[in-house]
Structure formats: structure tokens, C-alpha cells
Amino acid sequence: MSAVELQRCRACGRCQSYPRALCKHCGARELESVEGSGRGTVFATTVVHRSSREDLATPYGLTLVRMEEGPMLMALLVGEAADFPAGAEVAVDPEATRERGLLTVSGQLPG
Amino acid sequence: VTASLTGVAALGADELAACSGPVEANALAVAAALDDAGIDRGAVDAVLTYDSIVAPDIMQANRVAEYLGLAPSYAATVGSGGATPAAAVALAIGLVEAGLARNVVFAHADLRAAVKREAVGRMAAVVGNPEFEAPFGPIVPTLYSFLAQWLIESGRATREDLARIAVQTRAWATLNPAAKMRAPLTVEEVLDAPPVAGPLGRYDCCLITDFAGALVVSGEPGEVRILAAAGAATHEEILQMNADDPLAAPTALAAELYERAGIAAADLDLAYLYDSFTITTALQLLAYGLDRGEGLGALLADPGIGPGARLPVNTHGGLLSATTSGLFHLVEAVRQLRGEADDRQVDGARTALVTNIGGVFSNHAALVLGVR
């Protein structure tokens, strides 16, 4: 279980997130919910010093991950932001994600 | 384009303080812009406004027209975030060129400073997807900081480049009595300021001020002509952006805009770039080719884009140091092109680029203005 849910178009085969009533790539209406691999590459990582959520202690790291299926997702970082540069290959932690209710990423995949 | 910007106005702090709310502030700004244009109230065929964040109203433009006693053919409240003023000018051009209106006014006012926290909270909620972004606690600077980190890691900007943008924008604001922040700023002060998100600190973020301004787009010949308009609305939420190249859309827009205006980037005398954050300016300096291919480091070396620059940018102090709305980029461009910018006047300026941006580098609206 990767904990990453995506939507795949039965017509063109491409994926999207957030879920829609039609495919943003081709407009087809035949869509299915699929479990993503959870693997992707970092677009960029930032450190949040001011948050709109009072229950998340600052500073904390946030990263944008381009999932290998195409869509981009935001994930909470476990660890140092400097360890997650653009292009780093990462995987979402299924267990930690379920515990926190938010996607988390805790390390680069072994090269 | 056969339309001109024939009138502009910005309310001063005292007038704003006396306003009962955004509708009245918009109305007074429209009245001042009509005076500036030298046209009669009865000559207004369309009233466009951008709704208040603090006091939303589904028919704000109608209320503004009603307050003024106008009876235009069209009144519409338009909204595409920070892109709205320049996008509204493009809509106004359409009304004029279609023969549906001769004089279109656009106004934007808000009284945000008093309700800063609440307003910021609402704006943050608007830009983040409620399921896939908002739960992670981002505010607008957080989202832009991803782009800042991306540009820095790609080797096309440094943290110091962003700081120089804040410093040079502030240098213009010191010459503008209407600017909110007028004390000179140093690169060290920007770098040492409290961090907000990633590379962005307090001085990398725009101000939240009260403001009211208006402009008139007219089919009548005017001194300041609109040479071209172009737009790009590719997405809203950051997760939906083109992650292969976030600069692709504005770069293509810039080429289209320059072609329509019959100019090259090097022909511009002035640039008014929407500066919600220093990174927003940096990304556009590259996308619009204002670095002439030499990179931000070379462009931003003293005086960079500040007073004395080869290409002055945001001579009023921008969103970073003067006033919140991108409407004032347009107001200042018109004043400069007419030679009415007092201590900050750029001599001989004839052509100006103006951009406004909504969302997280999502919705781009750009104009080229010129005088003969």
C-alpha cells in the first residue's frame, strides 16, 4: 500500500490528481481510481517558518514531489530539507502517512 | 490596439482613512480617474471592479456605479487574483474594439490593513487546494518559496539576487511619498530578516496595505496608448503547474506580447513587474528577457533595476514597498509616460511593460503601453 491515490483515464492512460469528473488531458469521462507507486522526484523543497496550521510545529519541511505517474503532490518532510534537493528520488512513507493523515517523505531512495 | 489609458487615480492615505468601505473607496477613485481623464460622468459605458477580500460583494461593480449615480451599459465585478487589473484592461479593450463601450473604468480598492490576519488567512485558503495543499499549512509565501528554491537550485538566481530586488525596489519607494515603506534597505537587512518560507524572509514578501485606485480605458485617442495585451492562464493551484518549466507560459506570453506590440525587450524604457514576492520579479526578469540573456547576477549589479538603472523596474516601489494592488503598476506607468512622476521621473521614457499575476505564478496578464 503506497497511500497515494491517483485517478487514471481509461481512454488516454494518463493520471491526474485531484480527482475530477473528466480527464484534464483528453476530456474523457472514463476514469478509475488507482494506487500510485508512491515514488517520485523532488521538484523543490522548502522550510515553513509561518504556517496556517497551528498544530504543526515550525519550522518544518515541505516538498513537492512529481510522482512517477505524472501528477505532483505535496508532502511533509521528515528530516533535513537540505537532504531533499530538486531531482532527488523519493518515496512516500505509507505507515507514517497513515498515522499523520498527511503524505510524508523521510528519505531519498537508495541510488 | 486602438484604446488608450486616458485617466488614472490613486487615493491618498487621508482620503482612504475617511472611507466607509471598499465600495466608497472605489467610487471616489473612479471619480478622481474621470477627472484625470477630463471626461464627464455620463460618458462612462462600463464599470469594472475587482472585489474586496475584506468585504466581498457579488455585485460590487453595480454598487460602485450606483454610489456614483452612473448608469453604464455594463457593470461587472471581475476576479483573477492579482492578475485582475491588467486582465480587466484587456477586457476593456475588447469592449471598446467591439463597439460596445467608448469609455470603461476599472477600480480596485480594499481596506485590508485593519484585518490583516483574517485577510491573509482567506487569501491563503483561496490559493491552496483544500485536500491536497491546505492540510500542510502553506501560506502564499510558502507556495512561492518552492519556485524560489527551484530557481536557486537551477543556478539561475542566488539568495542575494532576491535580496537585491527588495533593496532596489525599496530605493524607488524612498522617492515616492505615497509609498508605505520609504526607509532605505540593505542586502544585509533583507538576509537577516525573520524567515517566512525557504529562502524568503519578511522583506521578500509584499505589503498588506489599504488602497484605492482606478483607471479609464478609452476608445478616444489619448496620450498613453495601449500597444499590446497578452495573457496566460494555465492553472490555479501550484500542484497543477507545468513542473517541467514554470517559466514556459510567461516566456511564450512575452514573445507574443512583444510581437503584437512590434517591439523587442531591449526597446522597453520601463518595466512594471507584479512583485508579490522578490522571486516573482526574478522569474519575470528572466521570462520577459529583461536580463538580455546575461542572467540575474549581471542585471542586478548596482544600480540593478533601481534608480539610475538601464531598465528601471517598479519605480513607485511596487507591492514590496509601496501598495498592495498591481493596479498601481498601471497607474505609475501612465504617470511616468506622461512625465508626471516627480522625483522618480525617468527622462524620455516612451515604452513600458506592465504585468499582473494571480495565483501562484498561475495567471499572467501583461500590457505594453507607449507614448509617441
Image (cartoon, rainbow, N blue to C red):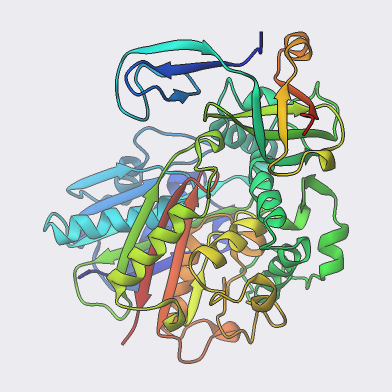
Residue at 72% from the left image edge and 29% from the top image edge: A90
Residue furthest out toward the front: A111
Q: Quadrant of residue A23?
A: top left
Horizontal side of B302 relative to B63 (left or right) equals right
Pinpoint residue B283: horizontal percent, then vertical percent: 58, 59
Q: How many marks?
A: 0
Tell me if residue B363 comes above or below residue A78 in the rendering: below
- Is the N terminus of chain A in the top left, top right, bottom left or bottom right quadrant? top right
Q: Nearer the viewer, residue B366 or B243?
A: B243
Q: Is residue B71 visible?
A: yes
Task: Answer above or below: position of B102 versus A81.
Answer: below
**Residue at the spot 59% in from the left edge and 64% down from the top edge:** B318
Residue B274, position as x, y percentages in the image: 53, 59
- In this rendering, position of residue B208 left or right of residue B80: right
What x and y, as percent, mark residue B51?
A: 43, 41
Q: Is residue B214 visible?
A: no
Residue B190 position in % (x across, y down): 81, 62
Quarter of the picture containing the C terminus of chain A is top right
Residue at x 32% of width, y 49% of height: B48
The residue sitting at 34% across, 59% down in the picture is B230
**Residue sticking out furthest to the bottom:** B348
**Residue B220 or residue B185, whichever sits in front:** B185
* Residue A63 relative to residue B37: left or right: right
